[in-house]
Amino acid sequence: MGHPLIRELWNHFPENMFLVRVEDNGHFTVEAANPAQLDTIGRECLGQPLPAFLPAATAESIYARYRECVARNKPMRYQEHAAFFDEHGNEQYGYWLTLIVPLHNADDAPQRVTHLFGISQDVTELHRARDALERHNQVLEARVEQRTAELQYANRELRLLNGQLEEMATRDFLTGCYNRRHIETLGQREIERARRYGTSLSVLMIDLDAFKQVNDTQGHAAGDAALKRVAASLQSALRASDLLGRFGGDEFMILLPESSNEDARATAERLQQQTHELAAISISVGVATLRRDDSLESLAVRADQQLLAAKREYHRKVSG
Ligand SMILES: Nc1nc2c(ncn2[C@@H]2O[C@H](COP(=O)(O)OP(=O)(O)OP(=O)(O)O)[C@@H](O)[C@H]2O)c(=O)[nH]1
């Protein structure tokens, strides 16, 4: 170690330093090792080829690197996971980050690599920390994944419940058609739409005839069943765009978008016929069609007046 600076560096550098001689028989012999290197593998390495003091597999993999460095005649930096015997002869495993530099005897043959100078840093702890971090990350990722799945499940449940709630808020519990509040909301919407697009809109108000009698003679449950049958038969006779709601008691409201008064009257007759056939119930129907100054209320009132007139007619027919 000629120069004092090099000597000081060699003696006090905290990482392992070594000098190996390139032998003609394919071996590499340790010519020198700094104190840090000797602390790691012991003095036995000095003057020895690698297989003399390293496990065979480790020596072979290091030899492969050395040979490559000699062949390329360029410094090489690599990392390896290697087994070695410590100064007490115990087998140890570690990760090493190594730099090897080919050296030449300039006077002799300038291109021939005679030695390799190496600096090796023990990065085992770094690896352990990285592994631990990776494991920790995996645990975290798994936890995040699980939480995400739980959240998605909760969201689905919430959407389902919201759907059910909305259903409950808009539907009539007994018949399944829209409740009064919702059919009125839809009525407002349909009036706005009809005005915007200049289309017609008709409303039917329907009341079951002599329904009280069903309740009185067959009981309330039979009355409920009849209401359901009527709602179902009304629904089945309507177009998809028509909207059926239970207005209260035995009264229903139907919105018929894009229906003229004439169309609505034809629909009313069809509904009467269908309810009679499918539900064995007679219904009275009032028809009204949207006018320029109408509100939903005034439209419904006119349909109701028509319904009362139809009722009178029904009673007249029945009593007469
Ligand atoms: N089963 C049952 N009956 C109901 C329900 N809501 C209202 N009703 C009954 O429906 C009947 C309505 O009577 P009205 O419309 O006044 O009398 P009606 O016998 O139909 O006579 P007209 O309408 O004049 O033909 C009453 O007996 C109410 O008790 C319900 O949810 N279920």
Image (spheres, rainbow, N blue to C red):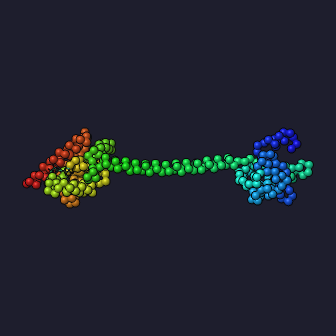
Which image quarter is the N terminus in?
top right
Q: Nearer the viewer, residue 31 or 231?
A: 31
Residue at figure coordinates x 92%, y 49% from the top left: 107
**Residue sitting at the far left:** 320
Residue at figure coordinates x 46%, y 50% from the top left: 150
Residue at figure coordinates x 14%, y 50% from the top left: 311
Q: Is residue 39 left or right of residue 206?
A: right
Position in image of residue 218 (x %, y %): 16, 57
Give the image quarter of residue 216. bottom left
Residue at figure coordinates x 79%, y 48% from the top left: 38
**Residue sitting at the far right:** 107
Tell me if residue 71 comes above or below residue 305 in the rendering: below
Position in image of residue 117 (x %, y %): 82, 48
Which image quarter is the C terminus in?
bottom left
Give the image quarter of residue 228. bottom left
Position in image of residue 104 (x %, y %): 86, 50
